[in-house]
Image: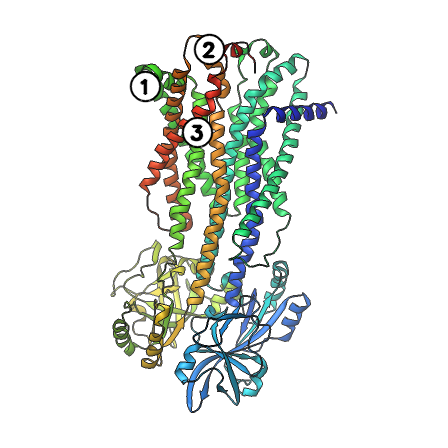
Amino acid sequence: MTAWRITLRLLRQDWRSGELYLLSAALILTVAAITAVGFFTNRVEATMERQGSALIAADLALESSSPLAEDLSQEARSRSLETARTVEFRSVVTAGRQPQLVQIKAVDPGYPLRGELRVAEATDLDDRPSATGPPAGDVWVESRLLRLLDIAIGDTLRVGETGLRIAAILTDEPDQGRNLFSIAPRVLMSRADLPATGLIGPASRATYRLLIAGPAEAIADFKPWLEPRLAANVSLDDALEARPEFASAVDRASRFLRLATLVTLLVAGAAIALASHRLVERQIDAVAVMRCLGAPRHLLMRVFVLRLLVFGLLASLLGCLLGWLGQLGLITALADWLEQDLPPPSLTPVLIGITTGMIALLGFAVPPLAQLAQVPPLRALRRDLGRPRASAALTLGAAGLALALLVFWQANDFELAWKLLAGLLGALLALILTVLVLVRLAGGLAGRASGVWRLGLAAMARRPGTAVLQITGLGVGILALLLLAVVRVDLLKSWQETVPEGAPNYFLINIQPHEVEPLREFLSSVEIQTPDLYPMIRGRLTHIGGQAVDPERYQDPRAERLATREFNLSYGAEMQPDNRIVAGDWWGSKDAPPQFSVEEGIAETLGIELGDDLTFWVSGHAISGPVTSLRKVQWDSFNANFFVVASPALLRDEPATFITSFFLPAEREAVVAELARRFPSVTTLDVDAILRQVRGVIDRGVLAVEYVFLFTLGAGLLVMYAGIQASLEQRRVEHGILRTLGADRRSLLTSLGVEFTAAGLLAGLLASIFAESTGYLLAEQLFELEFSFNPGLWALGVLGSGALIGVAGTLATYPLLIRPPLRTLRGEG
């Protein structure tokens, strides 16, 4: 009870005197950043996953070449999940006497479960969303079918044995881009009308899909039940596996958000350590008096720990409240972009925030405060005894352990965590060693300088430990601000440019060899930049490294599906421009011996290693060759790309069709109609829908990262302020003595300007170096983006920090100069 009574009394006194303001600000900001990101990313990532769900019109999609068992949908409905069925097939429709091959999709009334359909009432009207598919008796068609058949809305389209009224123009389907090799133009009808068409029988070639959607928890419970019950010819798709380019965008968004959170955590941790250092300075005299009055060390330690726990819990709760308000602000700002029915966040971020705050406080603040228990009672009478010496091993060990624990916990990504920790450790060691060298250099220059220059530089050399702590803290703060600029200006810009304006929005497939040159000439005649055309050959993977491919030996469902599917193979002497070799070597010659290059992701999924022999069954016979390179493919470039590419010697004699992609502005859509007329066997695929969704994910991710980095900005400014405040207690005594010895205020003020400006220049120089280095490593190693060094960042970092810290430090210490020297010599607070 005595410890609790003393604890509460001291906390009340500390708060009234302002002792805890800086430490509480650092802790509240840390917890606010963690909880805001926790609340916000839970909701935003759910929204991003819904964007992925829109690509398959559901959360889960089962696909088969035969009707799917009814018990699967019954089980889903019993778990309160929504279901809808679709049937997709190719057929010929007629209007009058003119036939046209189309891709028909018959859907249930509940289709789509995710995303939205968009239709227009006429070709010259804007489209509108539709909550359901067409009603029975109606059909929606793409606009080019109207041009091809020379018909209009309201006319009758003959589908098999029945006639359906064309009620609207189909402008967008959520799952339109799920299969790049579907035949266009597309026709959407009700599944209730399907029996009347007479087009679907027991042996019909059709694709049957069962769409499933519901709460994330219910989907997560249902999926393990579902997977072992699927027949061999049934594939299961989820949101993030729907398209690799979409998965790439979501993955980068998640990594950027985690990076922003971790940088805020690291910088705020530095602020907590600096604030604890200042708190120790201000508490020494009070502790000495308590020791004189008989307080034992164990009581003092108990009081210190209780003070931290109570203070940490209150500050963490306040940080959680601030984090909640912060994520509400961002949700409001993104109201036009985000879905209105965002799932509410759980209380998990609150528990995570409080735990993070307590770990950060105990790890960074306990070691400095533990020194207070070592204060001798004689300190109350002899002020020259100073503060007790801290244990460097305890301080660094506790801070390092807390930092590692928090980083690995919050990152949820081992690669991101260890790279960030390794980079931070290297940066801190380099920063401290460099500062030590520069402080010694400043001491040498002080001996050759005169006047206020000598006084300012000598102040840095006179307190090397404080100078290292101060400049390192300032450097970390400036590094956070500059890293914010690097991520905002360079990395996020590079990320947005991965899907630039003008990215290919049309694919041409089924191009026959004799059509390659005429097609090139046609595209050139309509002023479309002649694209590269790549040969494409279908093949099934049968052996890896001499062992037969057995789908059942793969634990990963995606690997199992890949092992049963046919691959689109290609060949060429030159590597595609948006591919990069990550292992092995590219052959680089059309006469190279038989060999393969494999995309690194699918190689990891299927267990393919460099040097393995692969065997594919192509056109009725086997072809084999070694894997001589692994490639990184930029899927979100929307260029034609392949998982497996062979040297020409392997596949050039095999029958092949060709594929290409190009960009066509919306106002030139008539070119597509002319292309279809001249090359009727070539299938044209419009992927604008996918481009819009991927760009939407990137834009939302960029805005989310920018918002989260506002916490980093606040933490960086707080660290800079804490760095300036760290030495005020020592300066108070020094300035009192110098004023007594005759130093005037103007000279002391100028020397402070020299000292703080020099510290700012040094911190800015080091921070600029580390910010650029960190940005380069993040771009190259983590996000796989192009990075260009920014000279303007160096000018901003060095000159800006010198001016900012010079002015801020001088203003912060100015009250010490107007303080009467007698009060300082008497030891008055």
> Which type of secondary structure does the marked residue at label 1 adopt?
helix
In the displayed structure image, the side of residue 306 where residue 332 appears, left or right: left
Between 172 and 504, the one lying in front of the other is: 172
Badge 2 vs badge 3, beta-carbon distance below 8 Å: no
Q: Where is residue 750 in the image (x, y as percent from the top left)?
A: 38, 19
Residue 737: assigned label: 2
- Mark 2 and mark 1: Cα distance apart in space: 24 Å
Of 218 and 521, the residue lying toward us: 521
Instruction: Report the residue at 43% width, 38% height from top.
Output: 481
Q: Which residue is disc 1 drawn over? A: 445
- Image mark for residue 636: none
Q: Which residue is drawn at 58% across and 36% down?
A: 28
User: Amino acid under label 2?
Assistant: Ile
* Residue 112 position in % (x across, y down): 56, 70
* Residue of label 3: 472
Circle 1: is it few (<14), some (14-19), or many (20+) Cα within 10 Å? some
Q: In the rendered view, would you say 12 is above or below 637?
A: above
Asked whether, in this view, residue 490 is left or right of residue 32, the answer is left
The answer for how far apart the CA atoms under marks 1 and 3 are is 21 Å
Work out which quarter of the rendered image holds the N terminus and state it.
Answer: top right
> Looking at the image, can residue 8 be seen?
yes
Measured in 3D between alpha carbons, the distance from the residue under mark 2 to the one under mark 3, in whole angstroms, is 27 Å
Within 10 Å of the Cα at label 2, are there few (<14), some (14-19), or many (20+) other Cα atoms?
A: some
Quarter of the image holding residue 794? top left
Q: Where is residue 113 in the image (x, y as percent from the top left)?
A: 58, 68
Looking at the image, which residue is at 56% across and 32% down?
363
Q: Is residue 42 above or below residue 84?
A: above
On the question of residue 554 being in view, the answer is no
Q: Which amino acid does label 1 sit on?
A: Leu
**From the viewer's perspective, is the residue at label 2 or at label 3 nearer?**
2
